[in-house]
C-alpha cells in the first residue's frame, strides 16, 4: 500500500513541475518489457554507484573547462560565444554553464560561495535524467481553471508521468493525503496548490487536505504533526527552508507515513521522493544573462546588490550559487550588499 501511496504522491506533484518520478504504465501488455527495462536501469545504477559515478551521462566538458580556466572578462565572454562553433547544442551549452567550475579570479565571490556553503547545496541537489527521456516542448500540458485561484492555467508537466483518471491502488480504500505549503497569497504558490488539488480531484478515492502554514516554520511543523496524529496515508511538503522541515518530516517517516518534498530541499535525507525543478538552470541562466549584458555594454566592472529569498531556502542557495559561478570569471564584479528577505510578499520590501 505504501508503494501505491508514494506513487500517487509523486504523480500529484509531477503535474506542476519537476523531475524524478517513476512512471506507471497503463498498458498491462507492456509490463514484461517495463520490468526488463527497470532491471536494466537498476543494474546501470548499481554500476554507477560502484564506480562512484552518479551523474547522468552526457558530453565531457573537461577540455573546454581547461581552456576557459585562466580567462576573465572579455576573453571569457569571447570563449563562451564560441561554444556553438565547437559543436555544442543549446542544451549542452546550458549544461556547460551549470557544471562550470568556479573561477578563482573574483575573490569576493569565492568567499561568499565558500562561507555560505553554496557548493554543498549544489552537491546535495538531486541529479538525474527525466523519466523515459521525456523532452518538454512549448505548448505541452493541460489547460485548467485553478481550484483555488480561479485563474486559467496550463500545467506543462501534466503529461510527464500521467496517472489515469479514476480510483488508484485499492478502489475500496480512501487514501488520505496531507498537503502543507506556505502562501495562498503568493501567486506561484497558490498555483502550485491549484495543480495538486486538480490532480487529487481526478481520483475518487483520494482525500487531500491542503493547509497553508503562512510562512511560519513552526506552524508547518505543527501541521505535519497533525497529519501524523490523523493517520494520513501520505504527506506532501513544500519546504520554505531546509532545516526547520527536517524534524517533523522525520517524525512522519518514523510513523511509517510516506513523505514527498517538492521544489525545495528539506532537512530530512530519508524522504520517499524529492520532486525537483530546474534551479541550477535558473542560476546558470542568470549568470549567462549578466555576462551577455556586460559584453553588450563592454563594461566588466559591475556593482551588484542581491535581494534574496530567506536564508536556508535551497532554491535561493542553488540559484545564487550557480549564478555566482559564472560571475566569478569577472574580477571587476563587486557585490555591494546581499540581503535575505521573507517569502511573504505582504511584508517583503526592497531595500
Image (cartoon, rainbow, N blue to C red):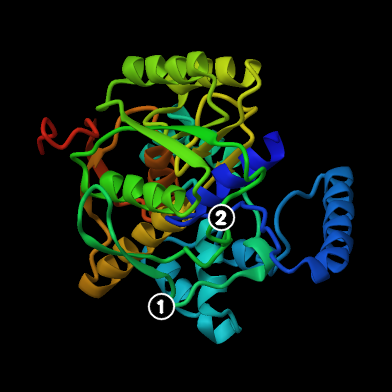
Asked whether residue 328 appears in the rendered view, the answer is no
**Location of residue 218 by image quarter:** top left
Q: Which mark is residue 138?
A: 1
Specify the quadrant that holds the C terminus. top left
233 or 179, which is in the foreground?
233
Q: How many marks?
A: 2
- Image location of residue 138, percent across then percent down: 41, 77
Q: Is residue 9 left or right of residue 299?
A: right
Q: Residue at x 21, y 42 (%)?
A: 186
Q: Which mark is residue 28?
A: none
- Image location of residue 9, percent across then percent down: 55, 42
Specify the quadrant that holds the N terminus. top right
Q: Residue at x 54, y 46 (%)?
A: 275
| Of pointers 2 and 1, the one earlier in the residue sequence | 2
Q: Residue at x 55, y 51 (%)?
A: 11
Q: Residue at x 58, y 18 (%)?
A: 250
Does dot 2 land on a helix, a strand or a loop? loop
Does dot 1 land on a helix, a strand or a loop? loop
54 or 160, which is in the foreground?
160
302 or 122, which is in the foreground?
122
Q: Which mark is residue 19?
A: 2
Amino acid at each position: 500500500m505504501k508503494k501505491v501511496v508514494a506513487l500517487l504522491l509523486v504523480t500529484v506533484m509531477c503535474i506542476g513541475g519537476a523531475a524524478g518520478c517513476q512512471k506507471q504504465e497503463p498498458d498491462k501488455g507492456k509490463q514484461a518489457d517495463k520490468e526488463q527495462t527497470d532491471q536494466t536501469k537498476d543494474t546501470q545504477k548499481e554500476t554507477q554507484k560502484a564506480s562512484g559515478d552518479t551523474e547522468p551521462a552526457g558530453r565531457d566538458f573537461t577540455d573546454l573547462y581547461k581552456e576557459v580556466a585562466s580567462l576573465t572578462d572579455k576573453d571569457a565572454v569571447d570563449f563562451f560565444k564560441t561554444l556553438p562553433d565547437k559543436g555544442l547544442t543549446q542544451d549542452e551549452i546550458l549544461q556547460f554553464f551549470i557544471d562550470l567550475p568556479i573561477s578563482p579570479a573574483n575573490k569576493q565571490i569565492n568567499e561568499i560561495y565558500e562561507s555560505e556553503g553554496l557548493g554543498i547545496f549544489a552537491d546535495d541537489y538531486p541529479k538525474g535524467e527525466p523519466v523515459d527521456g521525456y523532452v518538454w516542448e512549448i505548448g505541452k500540458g493541460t489547460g485548467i481553471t485553478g481550484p483555488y485561484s480561479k485563474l486559467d492555467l496550463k500545467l506543462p508537466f501534466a503529461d510527464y508521468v500521467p496517472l489515469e483518471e479514476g480510483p488508484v491502488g485499492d478502489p475500496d480504500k480512501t487514501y488520505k493525503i496531507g498537503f502543507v505549503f506556505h502562501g495562498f497569497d503568493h501567486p506561484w504558490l497558490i498555483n502550485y496548490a491549484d495543480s495538486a488539488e486538480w490532480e487529487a480531484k481526478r481520483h475518487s478515492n483520494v482525500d487531500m487536505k491542503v493547509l497553508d502554514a503562512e510562512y511560519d516554520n513552526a506552524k508547518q511543523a505543527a501541521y505535519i504533526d497533525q497529519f501524523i496524529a490523523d493517520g494520513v496515508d501520505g504527506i506532501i511538503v513544500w519546504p520554505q527552508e531546509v532545516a526547520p522541515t527536517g524534524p517533523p518530516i522525520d517524525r512522519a517517516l518514523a510513523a511509517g507515513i510516506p513523505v514527498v518534498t517538492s521544489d525545495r530541499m528539506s532537512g530530512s535525507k530519508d524522504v520517499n521522493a524529492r520532486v525537483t525543478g530546474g534551479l541550477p538552470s535558473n542560476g546558470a541562466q542568470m549568470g549567462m544573462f549578466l555576462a551577455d549584458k556586460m559584453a553588450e555594454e563592454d563594461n566588466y566592472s559591475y556593482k551588484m546588490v542581491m535581494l534574496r529569498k530567506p536564508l536556508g531556502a535551497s532554491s535561493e542557495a542553488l540559484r545564487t550559487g550557480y549564478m555566482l559561478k559564472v560571475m566569478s570569471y569577472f574580477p571587476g564584479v563587486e557585490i555591494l550588499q546581499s540581503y535575505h528577505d521573507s517569502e511573504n510578499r505582504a511584508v517583503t520590501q526592497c531595500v
